[in-house]
Amino acid sequence: MHNFLDAIEEHFTDSLKRINFIFKNEKIIMECIRNFEGFSLLGESFGPFEKGKKYKLNLFSSIPLIEKDILKVTDTDKCDNFDVQRYAIGERDDMKLNTRTNNFFLNKIKEFKRIMEIEVDKNNKPKIDFERYNSYASNIIDSRLLKLLKLSMTELSLEDERRLTNSEKLFYKNLNILIRIWKDFYTL
């Protein structure tokens, strides 16, 4: 039984990492805050960047440029403590899973935590904003987890499935299997 659980854990963790990798390769809109000539790395060019102009870049390649005060995330793509607070309140106030237009919603919260950290380290945002971000993010995860647990004990409808993010669909599938095995063991 221990090897079975280890295999499930390993598969689940790998799948979550793949989903997060896909999100990190999503394009986000960045705004240049300082002129930069650019550079090439492994055959890929980054820049040049001109102050005030907007660029669509992969999230993972934007992080070092954010750290160096060359780019910042535009307001349309940002995810800060105010956004996460709004999401947390929405989750708290609705008994059903809220539908998210972005299937990488939870990945965005996870990855933008790093951007919040950078902003705090550079004294662009107070540390309390980062603490609030973490608190609200934790509330979202806990709220959605409770809703998923309730949902996993029922048959998933098409409407319910549309409300799930990519990682939640994966979680639901694994959780549903484990709950079914457990229930069957005691009822059959």
Image (cartoon, rainbow, N blue to C red):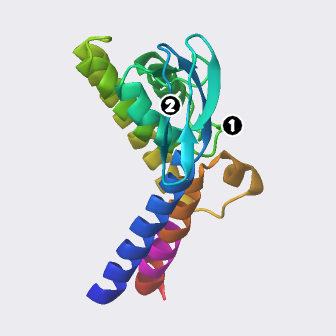
Q: Position of residue 101 (x, y in %)?
A: 69, 37
Q: In the rendered structure, which segment of residues is drawn in magenta?
A: 175-182
**Distance between mark 1 and mark 2 Cα atoms:** 33 Å
Query: In the rendered image, which residue does mark 1 sit on?
Result: 101
The secondary element bearing badge 2 is classed as: loop
Q: Nearer the viewer, mark 1 or mark 2?
A: 2
Q: Position of residue 67 (x, y in %)?
A: 35, 27
Residue drawn at (51%, 26%), measured in percent from left and top? 87
* Residue 71 seen anywhere in this rendered image of the structure: yes
- Image: 60 above or below 171: above
Nearest the camera: 47 or 153?
47
Is residue 15 left or right of 127 when viewed as pictured?
Answer: right
Residue drawn at (56%, 42%), measured in percent from left and top? 45
Is residue 53 left or right of 167 when viewed as pictured?
Answer: right
Whether residue 22 appears in magenta in the rendering, the answer is: no
Mark 1 or mark 2, earlier in chain: 2
The secondary element bearing badge 1 is classed as: loop
Residue drawn at (31%, 80%), measured in percent from left and top? 6
Quadrant of residue 85 within the rendered picture: top left
Nearest the camera: 90 or 129?
129
Q: Position of residue 72 (x, y in %)?
A: 48, 20
Quadrant of residue 74 within the rendered picture: top right
Query: In the rendered image, which residue does mark 2 sit on?
Result: 38
